[in-house]
Image (tube, rainbow, N blue to C red):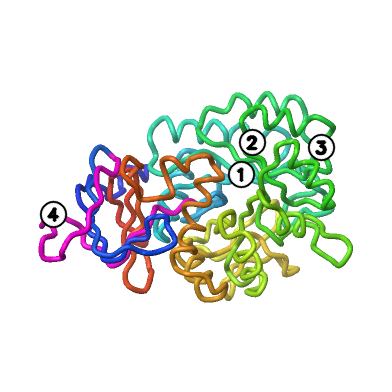
Amino acid sequence: MLRRETRKCPIQFVFAKTLFDGGLEPRFNILIEIENGRIKSLCGLNEKDVPLNALNAPIVAPGFIDIQINGAMDRQFTDDPTLEAIEAIATGARQGGTAHVLPTFTTAPGETYLTALRAVEKAVTVGVPGVLGMHLEGPFLSPERPGIHSVANIRPLEDRDIKNLGEFKGGKLLVTIAPEHQADGMLKKLVATKAIVFAGHSDATESQIRIAEVGGLVGATHLFNAMSQMTGRAPGVVGAILSSTSLAAGIIADGHHVSWPNLAVAARLLPDRLCLVTDAMSTLAGKNTQFCIHGKTVRLKDGKITDDNGRLAGAHIAMDECVRNTIRYANVTPARAVAMASKNPASVLGLHQELGSIKVGYRASLTIFNKDMETTNVIVDGEIIKAEMPV
C-alpha cells in the first residue's frame, strides 16, 4: 500500500525565514516548535541561534486544504472508491503543497456513493495522513448544468440519501447540490445531518439561492463553472454568491475554468470566503494523459483536460500553482492567497480552531516553499512528508 512507501518522520523545529501564519502580514525569522503533532511555541529568533535539528525553510504557510480533488497519481476516486485510491490522491496532492484533502466523488448511479463513504471512513480510521472527510459532488445536481457529469445518473435527494449521509463517520462531509431541484424540506434535512452544503451544477436563480441560504446553504462549488451566470437583470448563482455577505465559494485558478479578471473580481469581493481548489483529476502527479470519466474519453493537452467536444473535465493543477496564479493574476498579496488555500477552507469546514493558521495549540500542518513559492515539503500533523514526484 502507498502508506508503507511514504517518507515521513516526526519533526521538532521548523525555522521560517518568512512565515504566513494566517494573518494579513508575513512574519520573519520565526522558530516553530512542534510537539505531539501540535504547535508548541512560536518565537522570533536570530538565524545563528536556530537549533541544528531544525528544518530551515525560506517560506512557511499553514498546510493547504483542498476541498475538491477528484484524483491523482493515475487514480480517480469516482472510478476507484478505495483506500488505495485515497492514499494516492493524498500523496499526489502533497506534491503541490496540500496537507489535507476531501477526496471528491462525483455523479454515479443510484447509491454507488456508499462505497466511497465507507472507503473514506476506513481511511480516517487507519490514519491516512491528511484526509479530513469527503466531498460528494452529485448526483443531486441539475440536468440543465451537468458539465461532464452523466445526466442519466443525476437525480434529486431522497430520504434514503439523508439516512445514508447522516450515518457517515469519516470526518467532514461536503455535499454539492442544485438546490432548485430538491423537494421542499430536503435541504434542511441534509443540513441536519451536519453536512456542509454547497450549490453547484445549478441553474438556480438568485432568489432560489437566497432561500437555500436560509435553509442552511453555505457556499458554491467551482464558482463560475456549471452554474447560472450573472446578467444585467438576472444575477443567477454567480451574482448571488458575489453579492452575498456570508456565502463561501471554491474556485479553480488555472486560467482555463475562470478568466483571470473573474478570478480577480471574486478575490476582491470574497477575500475571507474564497477557497482555492484544484478540482484535480488522476493526471495530477500521474503518468497517463488520457482516461475515461462518466463513459467519456478525456485527454490532457496544454494544461487542460477536455472531452472530444472541448468540454472541460476537471483540472490539471496543483494547489501551489493555484496560489501563485492568484498572486499574479488576481493582484492579491501572498498572505491573502495563502489564506485562500488554508484559512478560508478551514473556516468552511468548521476547523478554523485547529487548521488554517499557525498558532500555538493548532495542529502542526505546514506547507514549506522555496523562495519562488514552489513546494519543497509538507508537514501533516507534525510529520514531515517529502513532496517528491513518483519514480
The residue singled out by tag 1 in the image is 105
The numbered mark at residue 53 is: 4
Kindly indicate whether the residue at mark 4 contacts the one at mark 3 (C-beta within 8 angstroms): no
Q: Secondary structure at mark 2?
A: helix
- Which mark is first along the chain, 4 or 3? 4
Q: Residue at x 58, y 76 (%)?
A: 302
The numbered mark at residue 84 is: none
Badge 1: few (under 14), some or many (20 or more) residues near its Cα, within 10 Å? many
- Image-based side of 249 in relation to 85, left or right: right
- Which mark is first along the chain, 2 or 4? 4
Q: Residue at x 64, y 29 (%)?
A: 165
Badge 4: few (under 14), some or many (20 or more) residues near its Cα, within 10 Å? few
Q: Position of residue 340 (x, y in %)?
A: 51, 58
- Which mark is first along the chain, 2 or 3? 2
The residue singled out by tag 3 in the image is 182
Q: CA distance from mark 1 to mark 4?
A: 41 Å
Query: Which residues make up the magenta segment?
Result: 37-65
- Image-based side of 189 in relation to 101, left or right: right
- Which mark is first along the chain, 4 or 1? 4
